[in-house]
Amino acid sequence: MTDTDTKDDAPAGLSLLARQLLERLPLPVMLLDSQARVLLANAGMQTALGAGLEGKPLTAVLRHPAVLDAVGAALASGGHSDVSFSIAGLVERHYEAHIARLDDGLVALLLHDITAIRRAEQMRADFIANVSHELRTPLAALFGFIETLQGPARDDAAARENFLNIMAREAARMRRLIDDLLSLARIELNEHVPPQGRVALEAVVRQAAAALAPLAAGDDISLRIESVPLQEIVGDHDELVQLFQNLIHNAIKYGRPGGEVRVTLGQESGHVFAAVADDGEGIPREALPRLTERFYRVDVKRSRERGGTGLGLAIVKHILSRHQGRLSIDSKVGEGSTFTVLLPEPGAMEKPPKAPDILPVTELL
Amino acid sequence: MMTDHTVKSFDEQLQALSAAVAQMGGLAEAQLAAAIDAIARRDSGAAERAVAGDVRIDALQQEIEERAMKLLALRQPMAVDLRDTLAAIKIAGELERIGDLAKNIAKRALVLNREPPIRLTQSLGRMGKAAQNQLKQVLDSFSNRNADDAEAVWQRDGEIDEIYNSLFRELLTYMMEDPRTIGLCTHLLFVAKNIERSGDHCTNIAEVVYHMVKAGYLNARPKADITSETSVPYEGRA
Ligand SMILES: Nc1ncnc2c1ncn2[C@@H]1O[C@H](COP(=O)(O)OP(=O)(O)OP(=O)(O)O)[C@@H](O)[C@H]1O
Ligand SMILES: [Mg+2]
């Protein structure tokens, strides 16, 4: 900003003041000459599109047809226009561009990054689509059986018995889905409020395991818990029980019938950890990064058959985020999976982050 | 726009040629993005845009070819200038193919979007994003004349192949479980194949960019595509 030399290619008539203003404007701005070359790109623009833009043809730095067409039109016949476009990448970015011809024949291009807005809209739409899809499936089954019971199977006692059982199962699934969604919403609401209680992790794990013991017995799976004496941690008792129920439930569900589920607790470098290991089918590598997505299931059909909604690990993720904890997943197809939860010791817990002024609406859904 | 016919000097002509290639790249990117949106978001409007947009890509390819030919004939460029000119022709050819594939994806999207949604289209969306990312990176490497970035794109093609392979298996299971889905799944299979091939064209472009900048060759790319070994009978129309 102390650079007072006017560059050779500096647009004629652009005062130092104007240059400084452009430079400091917290919005990406660039000026293009009559050949659509970048004459000037401020810091915001370099952040958006990369360094070293000045002197390059526009096509070398921004080639979306909507932008090129609008700049072409502005150069040819003046005026201004707004266009929106996206740039692909690991994180796709969305922009609105305002393009206007200035009096001296230059074209100004101003960007507005609308990525966050787009993502929020998208998340909301995906979420609603998923929920309705998940609810519609059992509902369709229920209607099917109701119609059969009203019609062809009206007087068939055996079929009635059988159908009512299936209907009860489907209805239970819908109720579970709604319970899980509500519980997810509640956890998310509190995500920015650090937990208050003091919790002994081993007791939490034992409580979660006890609730699942009948299920494990049903699959002839032995459930083992191994622990060393642990420091108490800061946490919400009920949420942590729910977290371990979800992990142990998965280990039983996707474990090997007749096999073993082992929970190992320990303490190291500022963390208390609990590893839930099974000797089941394992998880393919490409699925690992997606497991905590809502409704993601490696094998949708299989999960459904076992009453799963695909929200279990999403709930785990949000509980952990509230507890400043981490989850690491280690799995080998055919050998089994280990889900390790790391929770900070009381001393290692960060100061509560300042709650955002506005809660993101989509996160509340 | 950008295609200024009044340029005189050889350098300017070469630059205009590069600009036209980049412009064509922008069109191919937009085309592919629209096609992927058409699939992943069930956006039939985007599908129609992608189908209609192909004309412009074809026209630009022709223009680039003609200009490059004229350059070759009248200026007889040497060394780096020759490589630049040839690169323009080759890249334009690859981009034209990507445009075609995108158009084909979009046409299938129009069919798919009339049917009830299939969850697998989300995986296709992810695969599409990976291909879009490859295309962006390789076009950037062209504009920045960066051989390392081009090589990185070339190396990364395995990722798309990996998603393709797992999707392929998933689709086969679907079709076997419920033969009524074979028609739909076949469309999805071709969409996946077309995305995978777009990825291949990106690696071709990467090779061209590498050669343009370094005058050397990238070769012996490890191929992760093993689907040809998975044989499961199914009766579907192409
Ligand atoms: N221990 C495990 N072994 C193998 N796969 C697992 C394991 N835990 C989770 N998964 C995979 O991750 C997916 C997501 O798990 P998640 O707990 O979120 O959902 P779910 O178990 O299908 O349903 P829910 O937990 O809501 O009943 C599962 O469908 C399964 O494919
Ligand atoms: Mg689960």
Image (cartoon, rainbow, N blue to C red):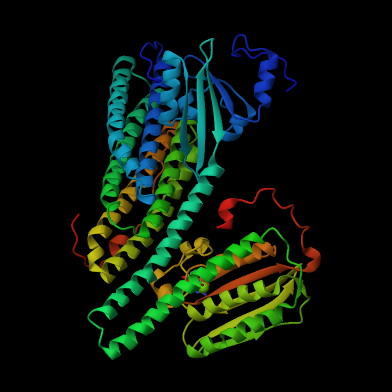
Compared with B33, A267 (above or below) is: below
Q: Where does the C terminus of chain A fall, quadrant-wise? A: bottom right
Q: Can residue A320 be spotted in the picture?
A: yes
Compared with A79, B54 (above or below) is: below
Compared with A326, B75 (above or below) is: above
Compared with B163, A211 (above or below) is: below
Q: Can residue B230 be spotted in the picture?
A: no
Q: Nearer the viewer, residue B210 or A255?
A: A255
Q: Nearer the viewer, residue A250 or A118?
A: A118
- Residue positioned 43% across, 54% down in the render: B159
Q: How many marks?
A: 0
User: At which x and y percent is residue B223?
Assistant: 37, 54
User: At which x and y percent is residue B140?
Assistant: 47, 35
Q: Where does the N terminus of chain A fall, quadrant-wise? A: top right
- Residue positioned 30% across, 66% down in the render: B174
User: At which x and y percent is residue A121?
Assistant: 50, 47
The reply, left or right, for residue B17 in relation to residue A362 is: left
User: At which x and y percent is residue A181?
Assistant: 53, 66
- Residue positioned 56% across, 53% down in the render: A362
Residue with the most extreme right position: A347
- Residue positioned 18% across, 64% down in the render: B235
